[in-house]
Image (cartoon, rainbow, N blue to C red):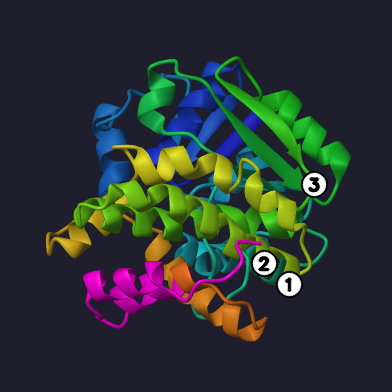
Amino acid sequence: MRVSVIGCGRWGTFLAWYSARIGHDVMLYGRQDSVSYNKLLKDRKNEYLELPDSVKLTCSISCVIEHADFIIIAIGAQQLRSLAREIALLNPAQKVFILCMKGIEANTGKRLSQVLSEELGPSTRIALWVGPGHVQQFLNNIPSCMVIGSQNIELTKKIVDEFGSELIRFYYGQDIIGNEVGAAAKNVIGIAGGMLDGLGVSGLKGALMARGAREVSRLIRAMGGNELTAYGLCHLGDYEATLFSQYSHNRMFGKTFVKGEKFDKLAEGVSTAEALVMLSKLYEVDMPICSAVYSIVKEGNDPKEVLTELFMRRTKFEF
């Protein structure tokens, strides 16, 4: 099968490598002015992996769309709308788009499948690929379980059949809203976990995980999804890789932020915190952890004061 991957960062390059490894004909797209793309073009490798010779590289959006029927998108969430507008000019009516991204559009609060559907049309076939997994671990043959979801179960099964392997075992996702919101929100909880590490109170992560999943489940339900999805692979199942892993950008961002140190990698949870605060107000859902992260990162409030207040909230029933 011919597969295109848009995005040559850490995750996108891995997805191209992985797709080629399991036997697909792969083309990987990066912007012409991208440092990551130019390094791959020159050396065919980055700090994580070396691309096999079979993976084609291109900086032409029309070439990468024309190449395949299954197009994986793995870019920063806030860049999706502008990319979708470029793709829309190419009339990609018969293509399947697989969003391997975790985020919510910050200025609108819209899920990424909504953004893509708005720009490409409501009949566009869109699937999600979410769940726990770090490039560094996959490259060391450490397996994981992930989720594929779409509005069409036959499409979901087709993608699982084409991309499943001993390295990645997939489950069928049945809740688009829950999987998108849960996957995006876990990055915000990851930032909070990193902040606890930075403040030397990592023991509070147990409470953070329990209460984080609870508040995200409330939002998913309010938005029309299944609240149990928050306790699946898209959210709770991804906590180990996000709240504890040395490879988690969101955890490292939170840790360095409270220490006043610089962190130069993309942490999607920063923009997602803004979107979740917007959605919590829109749907009238109490989301104290996400609001605390937003208060610290976006409003400049003192991390120790905000997190102390968060964990010392008034006593109430757990459920």
Q: Quadrant of the N terminus?
A: top right
Q: Is residue 102 visible?
A: no
Q: Amino acid at mark 3?
A: Gln
- Pinpoint residue 29: horizontal percent, then vertical percent: 46, 44
**Relative side of 213 to 12, left or right:** right
**Relative side of 161 to 145, left or right:** right
Q: Quadrant of residue 4?
A: top right
In reply to whether residue 313 is colored magenta, the answer given is yes
- Pinpoint residue 185: horizontal percent, then vertical percent: 52, 60
The answer for how far apart the CA atoms under marks 2 and 3 are is: 18 Å
**Residue placed under numbered mark 1 in the picture:** 222
Assign a secondary structure to mark 2: helix
Front residue of this view, candidates 297 and 114: 297
Q: Amino acid at mark 2?
A: Arg
Front residue of this view, candidates 257 and 42: 257
The count of marks equals 3
Relative to residue 115, is residue 99 depicted above or below? Answer: above
**Residue placed under numbered mark 3 in the picture:** 174
**Residue placed under numbered mark 2 in the picture:** 218
Whether residues under marks 2 and 1 lie with C-beta atoms below 8 angstroms apart, the answer is yes
Relative to residue 244, is residue 284 depicted above or below? Answer: below
Q: Residue at x 47, y 20 (%)?
A: 54
Assign a secondary structure to mark 3: loop
Residues in magenta, as a range? 290-319
